[in-house]
Image (cartoon, coloured by chain):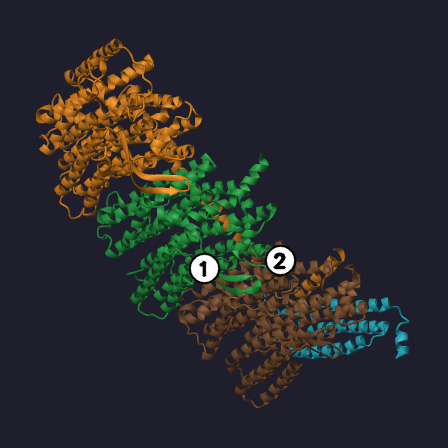
């Protein structure tokens, strides 16, 4: 029942927001809802009992409205509900048109995302998966920047392409289930699919997640979309929606098509690692700050994807840790980028410089977030990169070396960007830009505390995911062992 | 009745079929190649009639009256169609002062 | 059967009412009549009956489709109240012709004899030929009706020829008998029978605008008065597919392999042409016409998959498709009025600013057509894919999915226009009734997407 | 013994003090007065120093050789258990004392040196943060905690090099330092991971106790040690990753003294000494270290010969001295390396602070060609600097003599060739240091102005450091001089040196005499060149000889790196973005879209609007289907 409450709070609030005229009150209501949801989620996390919710939905199609969770879902749920208060907060004291609709859409997105992470039925999962996209599409379309008409449509169609293949995959699995068919994950996990089928089914299922994450070379929607997206939309996209891809892959690929995963494992890892390096290298010469961060995000996500396919305990723990860490870091980064844009009126790196002279606190906070992003020890970023590289190392030393290159390349482009923006002599025209305001502290300080706090005390998150990660890696193990036995 | 039916059966069934196919094709060609709407209407009638002929022949050969009943239905419908068709031709004539079918090509793409 | 009779009588009554020159009573009368029909139809649910030497068999299948079509017709009439206010002459004829067509549609859902099928198709078509030309002085309306008529009768000729050939081979018009007759060949049918069956199928396929026999539909949809287009796109299509399915299930299943392959080719072509044709469309009515073709492709997929659920899916699909299409045509009319008769997609620009709620529901309706979750359209497509994939038609399913993607693109193209701001500010006038109906349809589309039913037919 | 446990637990106070200092000065940087910040920061480091001293005595009195204090479980998953723990043993205590002791002096000095700068508070905050990180580095009980400090000091180094961030050159230098360190760090972290997979632990005690199970030369150990070495090479500025250190002189001088001379750059040495057990098992790695160390020592010394920036000379000298430490490490003489590290911390910090004093006096001028004759105006600085010079040159009885001589004799043990090369390096060191000394303090003042002695707060640290530099050698008087190598023995519990082959005292004395004679000759040569002839080095780029130019341009290594790495990286970035991303990948996706649209247009065009055409199409379709069903 508690799961249903978590799912429904944002939705109900979102609907009620449409009735509120005063935009300040409305934002406050949205924030309260998001915070309340976070609190409920925390109570769920700390409660000992396992909660679930299930009602029949479309019985003749084997669809149930089943909500449940394991450690992985819990991490994702936590991420979503952790970030949305901030995403709502990011709009405070800012002029936005049509606020009721904007905030309603944001909260609808939240509901859908929660649904994705809690669904225990593939059909339900798919429904929420698509539902999450719709409000975001409108947020981008209505509040986006230059060129939004074409870019959003491309983004929408591109991501849907993957989703439709996923739908095909789900139906295919559905009709494989014995008896009166069902789309429950638990039934899918029992399937014993022939390995030749798994080999192609893998791609049918994976393509949706690859596009959503995105993994090289399916990423081309991303930079332009991020660049024109409004801040809050971008936060949703980069902070939470990219994780949908990871979550989906974990839910679908490893338990259902383990042989397919093993067959394609190295190919995909190499693809992801190419993405890591590709994005990092490209980020170096980006002149648009948002685009630079978009590529940096892609590099991180690619590393996460690579780690996912390694499928050992360390990599998975690191991956799940990075889910939170990356989410927090990226929204802090985008927030600061937005602050810089508001103050300077540009996001072009070549137009900036010396902002630290006028806004030292902003510079310090940005630096802290960047440190999190480039995985300095005692930030959360380090824990996950360390574990992911450890995981990659177990698979192959070279994977670890190329994955580890992010440490270097990340430092190269992030510090370059930092210096271009903050350091150097003050640019003409920036003499009057203000330092950050108290509201911005309220936004950034908690995030930075999370970044540092998790870097110092990562254990709670580990414990949250521990069992599920253990179970997850065991999906592959028997298959891998049997294959090894054949080789021997 | 019996005699008519046996009289019909004097001619082999193939001949009826060939005849009606020929009629059908003539109608078809007319519809395809003529541009005058009235002639096209007539050609469609011809196609219908070829079917009536065929049905009658089959009916006789199968000694089954249903085919002939069907012929009546066809004739009624054909009459109704022609009524509608001709009124359309009139309307067309009124609107564009022509009955050339190829002038009707504003709706496209 | 009483439904059929009442419908026919209702049409005649309406014609007489037309003599009173009182337009206001037409729609209420028609709707009342239809409601009675609806009630009577529902009463026959579960009590199948046969008429005219079993030429007409009313079973649950026909009742379900009849009910669905009656509901859609009532919807169209409700919208028609506002639409026909502007028209001075022959309003009664418009109503009664639609009701006559509906009577034909009833026949098409309940035949068990090829003659009845033929009659049904013709009773449906002939009023439509007239309706399409409803705007007597309009060149486009004229052209539409003539094209429809010409191609329609041409197709009918083939259809008839097919019936004659089948009759010649099997000596019967009764579908069950034809079925047993075909069964004895074990799939190796004599050419004459094969060609006859093909012609029959083509005749029905023409009505539901399956490629390559779709050419009439974009032109006719564009040229015909919009309300008639809505009727054609929904009721006629529903009737056509009901007939198609009944024809297959009563008479032809299991389909001989060559025919089956031919139908698959048609399905593929329909999907392709429908979606690609709509892709670059700038005229909204044509866009919906092509979208109708595309949906025909999806429905074909369900029909050909020969699953226990096929009929139910067919019913669901056609109903929710109609439910989304009718209000879209109405919204189009309203928007078109506001922009002095233009029909391009651009006229939707600014709708979001002018009538936000209408814009939202337009979006929902378009999303339903596109097949985005939590709309009924999604569930419909989902069920279609469930059928086709579980019958093992993987390649065509993948193809259909890609085509659905193109579909999403052009529907969202319209959505994008709806949410694009524009400098022009012609007010869009929406009557209360229309607004309410649009909202009801939008809500229904979502509700049907959440509370999914399947009818045991 | 019994009382040890509670007292030892205060160990967390040692890093906590500077952290507290950082938090105070950092968070209140807008409100604190400059002097307050300086005093708070210095006091915090001083407290740490006191705590370290206390700890030293506690440990000593306990009779234990080491103690591990676990604060909390940092990462504990599956079979990976990495506590946040401190290891207190003789090695880490030595380092802690150096860091806090020398660090405190430098903090104190900074109060004077940095006065007048508007961002003093930030400066002290960062210095405290550095001290904290450095302490973590040396106190960590496992490789990962060490790594925290390792990266932390890198960050602080980055911040402090770019302290004067208005100048883009400083920022570039800072970034370069960080990135080069990161390259090393990647190797390091990979080494740690391999270590983890080999030993299922990264804590020193477990790794070392399990290491004995491996044979000498085991490939996996060699691999681990080589990877760790990469980290050390980056941090300690060895070939090929040394170019960042000279550039790092862009930071304020106390930073150069603390970070880029006394502490951070020696972290690599510390780490290898800490892993001595592993390195002992990897002879190949040791040889690599020898080659790297020696090459670095010579190369840097040669470059230092013709540098004209006072800090650059010292920077290259640091690189060179680090090379010596590496040489010692490679020879397996870890405690000798640590000893040299210690003395180097004293004299190099002294030299840098002296240089800072000079720069302070000269109003920011760093070019030694423009100085001269400062001995009169700045007596304290002069004397202390002189002491430092003597120490680094290895003149007895200054501290450098003891440590360097120990290294040379170890080299001699290994091979004569090694000894000769190392000796040449030492002579070069002596030459450039005296060149520096003479040019700065001797002769005539070459620039107008009135240099003055620095304030007390700056000179006191100089004096203390000069005392340490002068007499630091007493810590480790070798046996042939009547001492008992206290320092080496002290470290023996935590650093396992390779079995030393004792060389006879007579040989040792012979070696010392040889080097002394040669050193005196070199000093004389320098004196003749720069004092007698009062030769002032020519303008850059004016040298006639190719070799001179080569040295002046630092063997073009920076340029080579720019051409080989930086520019191609930029090109690659541009290429990938403009050619791959924007002309292949993105258009490929769009291409699918536009191709589909193209087909869409095609399909639309079929709809020609002509009834005859439609009829034809229908008939054609029907005919095709007839043929189709009859054939199939």
Which numbered dot is residue C390?
Answer: 2
Q: Nearer the viewer, residue A376 or B99?
A: A376
Question: The disc numbered 1 marks a residue on which chain?
Answer: A
Separation of marks 2 and 1 at Cα, in angstroms: 30 Å
Q: Nearer the viewer, residue C60 or A70?
A: A70
> Where, by quadrant of the figure, is residue C140 drawn?
bottom right
> Where, by quadrant of the figure, is residue D194 drawn?
top left
Rendering colour (chain C) = brown
Circle 2 packing at 10 Å, graded few (<14), some (14-19), many (20+), is: some
Q: Is residue C31 above or below residue B31?
A: below
Which numbered dot is residue A52?
Answer: 1
Residue A375: where, in percent of width, then height? 35, 42
Residue at image coords 12%, 21%: D443
Q: Which residue lies furthest to the bottom in this view?
A: C20
Q: What element does badge 1 sit on? A: loop
Q: Is residue D73 left or right of residue C56?
A: left
Task: Identify the image quadrant of the N terminus of chain C.
Answer: bottom right
Chain letter for the green part:
A
> Where, by quadrant of the figure, is residue D105 drawn?
top left
Residue at image coords 25%, 8%: D506
Foreground: disc 2 or disc 1: 1
Rendering colour (chain D) = orange
Q: Nearer the viewer, residue D270 or B48?
A: D270
Residue A230: where, in percent of width, then height? 36, 57
Chain letter for the cyan part:
B
Residue at image coords 54%, 89%: C22
């Amino acid at each position: 029942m508690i799961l249903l409450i978590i799912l429904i709070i944002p939705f109900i609030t979102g609907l009620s927001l449409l009735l509120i005229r005063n935009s300040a009150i409305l934002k406050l209501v949205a924030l309260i809802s998001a915070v309340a949801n976070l609190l409920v989620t925390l109570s769920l996390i700390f409660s000992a009992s396992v909660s679930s919710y299930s009602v029949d939905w479309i019985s003749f199609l084997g669809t149930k409205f089943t909500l449940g969770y394991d450690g992985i879902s819990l991490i994702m749920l936590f991420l979503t509900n952790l970030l949305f208060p901030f995403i709502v907060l990011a709009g405070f004291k800012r002029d936005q048109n049509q606020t009721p609709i904007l905030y309603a859409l944001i909260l609808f997105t939240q509901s859908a995302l929660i649904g994705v992470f809690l669904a225990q039925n593939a059909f339900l999962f798919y429904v929420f998966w698509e539902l999450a996209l719709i409000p975001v599409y409108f947020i981008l379309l209505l509040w986006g920047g230059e060129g939004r008409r074409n870019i959003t449509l491309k983004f929408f169609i591109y991501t849907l392409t993957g989703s439709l293949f996923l739908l095909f995959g789900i139906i295919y699995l559905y009709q494989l289930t014995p008896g009166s068919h069902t789309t429950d994950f638990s039934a899918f996990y029992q399937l014993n699919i022939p390995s030749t089928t798994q080999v192609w089914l893998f791609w049918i299922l994976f393509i949706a997640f690859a596009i959503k994450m995105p993994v090289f070379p399916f990423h081309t929607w991303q930079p332009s979309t991020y660049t024109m997206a409004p801040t809050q939309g971008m936060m949703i996209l980069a902070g939470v929606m990219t994780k949908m891809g990871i979550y989906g892959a974990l839910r679908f690929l490893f338990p259902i098509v383990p042989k397919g995963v093993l067959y394609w494992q190295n190919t995909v890892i190499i693809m992801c690692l190419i993405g890591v390096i590709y994005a990092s290298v490209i980020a170096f010469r980006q002149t648009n700050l948002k685009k630079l961060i978009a590529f940096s995000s892609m590099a991180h996500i690619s590393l996460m994807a690579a780690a996912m396919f390694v499928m050992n305990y360390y990599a998975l723990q690191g991956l799940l840790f990075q889910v939170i860490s990356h989410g927090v870091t990226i929204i802090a980064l985008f927030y600061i980028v937005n602050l810089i844009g508001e103050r300077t009126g540009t996001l072009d790196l070549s137009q900036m410089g010396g902002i630290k002279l006028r806004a030292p606190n902003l510079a310090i906070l940005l630096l802290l977030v960047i440190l999190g992003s480039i995985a300095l020890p005692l930030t959360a970023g380090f824990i996950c990169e360390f574990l992911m590289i450890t995981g990659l190392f177990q698979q192959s030393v070279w994977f670890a070396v190329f994955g580890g290159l992010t440490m270097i390349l990340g430092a190269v482009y992030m510090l370059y960007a930092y210096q271009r923006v903050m350091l150097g002599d003050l640019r003409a025209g920036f003499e009057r830009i203000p330092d950050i305001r108290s509201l911005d502290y309220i936004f950034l300080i908690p995030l930075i505390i999370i970044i540092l706090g998790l870097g110092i005390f990562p254990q709670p998150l580990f414990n949250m995911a521990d069992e599920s990660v253990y179970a997850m890696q065991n999906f592959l193990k028997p298959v891998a062992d049997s294959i090894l036995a054949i080789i021997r | 009745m019996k005699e008519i039916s046996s009289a019909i059966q004097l001619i082999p069934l193939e001949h009826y079929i060939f005849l009606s196919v020929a009629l059908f094709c003539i109608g078809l060609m007319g519809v395809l190649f003529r541009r005058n709407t009235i002639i096209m209407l007539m050609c469609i009638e011809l196609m219908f009639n070829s079917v009536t002929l065929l049905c009658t022949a089959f009916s006789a050969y199968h000694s089954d009256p249903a085919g002939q009943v069907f012929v009546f239905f066809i004739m009624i419908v054909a009459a109704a169609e022609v009524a509608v068709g001709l009124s359309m031709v009139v309307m067309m004539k009124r609107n564009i002062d022509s009955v050339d079918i190829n002038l009707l090509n504003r709706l496209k793409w | 059967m009483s439904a059929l009779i009442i419908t026919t009588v209702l049409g005649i009554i309406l014609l007489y009412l037309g003599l009173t020159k009182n337009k206001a009573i037409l729609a209420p009368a028609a709707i009342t009549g239809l409601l009675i029909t609806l009630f009577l139809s529902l009463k026959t649910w579960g009590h199948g009956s046969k008429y005219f030497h079993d030429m007409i068999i009313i079973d649950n299948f026909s009742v379900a489709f009849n009910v669905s079509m009656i509901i859609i017709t009532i919807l169209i009439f409700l919208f028609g109240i506002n639409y026909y206010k502007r028209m001075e002459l022959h309003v009664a004829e418009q109503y009664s012709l639609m009701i006559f067509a509906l009577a034909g549609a009833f026949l098409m859902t309940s035949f068990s004899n090829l003659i009845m099928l033929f009659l049904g198709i013709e009773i449906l078509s002939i009023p439509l030929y007239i309706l399409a030309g409803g705007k007597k002085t309009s060149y486009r309306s004229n052209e539409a009706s003539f094209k429809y008529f010409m191609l329609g009768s041409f197709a009918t000729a083939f259809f008839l020829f097919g019936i004659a050939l089948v009759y010649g081979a099997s000596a019967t018009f009764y579908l069950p008998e034809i079925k047993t007759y075909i069964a004895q060949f074990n799939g190796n049918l004599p050419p004459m029978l094969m060609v006859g069956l093909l012609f029959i199928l083509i005749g029905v396929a023409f009505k539901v605008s399956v490629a390559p026999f779709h050419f009439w539909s974009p032109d006719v949809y564009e040229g015909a008065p919009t309300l008639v287009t809505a009727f054609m796109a929904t009721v006629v299509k529903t009737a056509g597919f009901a007939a198609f399915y009944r024809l297959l299930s009563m008479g032809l299943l299991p389909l001989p392999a060559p025919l089956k392959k031919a139908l698959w080719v048609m399905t593929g072509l329909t999907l392709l042409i429908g979606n690609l044709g709509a892709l670059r469309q700038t005229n909204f009515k044509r866009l919906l016409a092509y979208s109708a073709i595309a949906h025909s492709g999806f429905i074909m997929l369900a029909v050909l998959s020969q699953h226990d659920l096929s009929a139910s899916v067919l019913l669901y699909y056609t109903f929710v498709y109609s439910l989304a299409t009718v209000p879209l045509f109405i919204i189009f009319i309203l928007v078109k009025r506001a922009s002095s008769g233009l029909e391009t997609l651009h006229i939707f620009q600014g709708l979001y600013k002018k009538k936000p709620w209408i814009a939202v529901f337009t979006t929902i309706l378009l999303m339903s057509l596109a097949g985005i979750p939590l709309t009924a359209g999604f569930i419909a497509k989902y069920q279609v894919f469930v059928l086709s994939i579980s019958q093992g038609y993987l390649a065509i399913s993948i193809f259909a999915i890609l085509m659905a993607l193109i579909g999403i693109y052009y529907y969202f193209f319209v959505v994008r226009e709806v949410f694009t701001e524009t400098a022009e500010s012609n007010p869009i006038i929406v009557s209360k009734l229309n607004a309410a109906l649009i909202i009801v349809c939008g809500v229904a589309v979502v509700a049907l997407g959440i509370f999914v039913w399947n009818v045991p037919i | 013994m019994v009382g040890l446990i509670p007292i030892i637990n205060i160990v967390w106070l040692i890093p906590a003090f500077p952290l507290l200092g950082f938090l105070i000065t950092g968070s209140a940087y807008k409100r604190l007065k400059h002097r307050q910040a300086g005093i708070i920061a210095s006091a915090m480091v001083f407290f740490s120093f006191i705590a370290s001293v206390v700890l030293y005595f506690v440990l000593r009195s306990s009779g234990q050789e080491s103690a591990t204090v676990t604060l909390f479980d940092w990462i504990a998953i599956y079979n990976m258990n990495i506590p946040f723990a401190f290891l207190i043993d003789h090695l880490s205590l030595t380092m802690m004392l150096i860091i806090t002791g020398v660090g405190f002096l430098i903090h104190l000095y900074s109060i004077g040196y940095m006065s007048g700068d508007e961002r003093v508070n930030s400066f002290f905050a960062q210095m405290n943060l550095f001290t904290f990180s450095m302490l973590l580095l040396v106190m960590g009980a496992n490789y990962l905690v060490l790594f925290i400090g390792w990266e932390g000091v890198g960050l602080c180094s980055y911040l402090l090099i770019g302290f004067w961030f208005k100048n883009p050159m400083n920022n570039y230098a800072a970034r370069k330092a960080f990135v080069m360190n990161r390259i090393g760090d990647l190797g390091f972290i990979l080494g740690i991971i391999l270590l983890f997979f080999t030993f299922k632990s990264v804590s020193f005690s477990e790794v070392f106790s399990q290491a004995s199970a491996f044979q000498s030369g085991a490939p996996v150990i060699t691999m681990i040690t080589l990877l760790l070495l990469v980290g050390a090479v980056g941090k300690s500025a060895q070939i090929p990753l040394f170019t960042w250190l000279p550039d790092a002189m862009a930071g304020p001088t106390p930073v150069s003294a603390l970070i880029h001379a006394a502490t951070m750059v020696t972290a690599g040495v510390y780490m290898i000494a800490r892993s001595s057990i592993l390195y002992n098992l990897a002879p190949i790695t040791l040889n690599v270290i020898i080659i790297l160390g020696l090459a670095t020592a010579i190369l840097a010394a040669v470059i230092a010969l013709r540098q004209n920036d006072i800090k650059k000379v010292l920077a290259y000298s640091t690189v060179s001295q680090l090379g010596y430490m590496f040489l010692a490490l490679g020879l397996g003489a870890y405690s000798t390396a640590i000893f040299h590290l210690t003395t180097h911390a004293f004299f190099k910090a002294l030299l840098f602070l002296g240089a800072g004093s000079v720069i302070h006096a000269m109003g920011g001028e760093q070019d030694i060609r423009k100085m001269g004759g400062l001995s009169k105006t700045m007596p304290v600085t002069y004397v202390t600097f002189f002491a430092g010079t003597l120490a680094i040159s290895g003149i007895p009885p200054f501290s450098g003599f003891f440590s360097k001589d120990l290294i040379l004799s170890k080299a001699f043990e290994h091979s004569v060739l090694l000894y000769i090369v190392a000796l040449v390096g030492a002579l070069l060191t002596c030459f450039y240091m005296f060149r520096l000394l003479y040019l700065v303090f001797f002769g005539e003042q070459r620039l107008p102005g009135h240099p003055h002695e620095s304030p007390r707060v700056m000179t006191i640290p100089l004096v203390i450091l000069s005392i340490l530099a002068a007499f630091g050698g007493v810590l480790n008087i070798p046996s042939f001089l009547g001492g008992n190598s206290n320092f080496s023995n002290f470290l023996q519990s935590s650093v396992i040196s390779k079995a030393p082959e004792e060389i006879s005292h007579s040989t040792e004395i012979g070696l010392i005499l040889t080097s002394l004679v040669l050193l005196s000759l070199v000093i004389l040569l320098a004196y003749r060149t720069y004092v007698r002839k009062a030769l002032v080095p020519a303008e850059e780029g004016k040298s006639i000889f190719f070799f001179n130019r080569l040295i002046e341009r630092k063997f073009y290594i920076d340029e080579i790196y720019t051409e080989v790495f930086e520019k191609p990286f930029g090109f690659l970035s541009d290429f990938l973005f403009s050619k791959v991303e924007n002309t292949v990948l993105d258009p490929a996706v769009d291409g699918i879209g536009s191709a589909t649209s193209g087909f869409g247009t095609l399909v639309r065009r079929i709809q020609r609007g002509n009834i005859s055409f439609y009829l034809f199409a229908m008939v054609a379709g029907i005919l095709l289907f007839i043929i189709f069903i009859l054939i199939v």
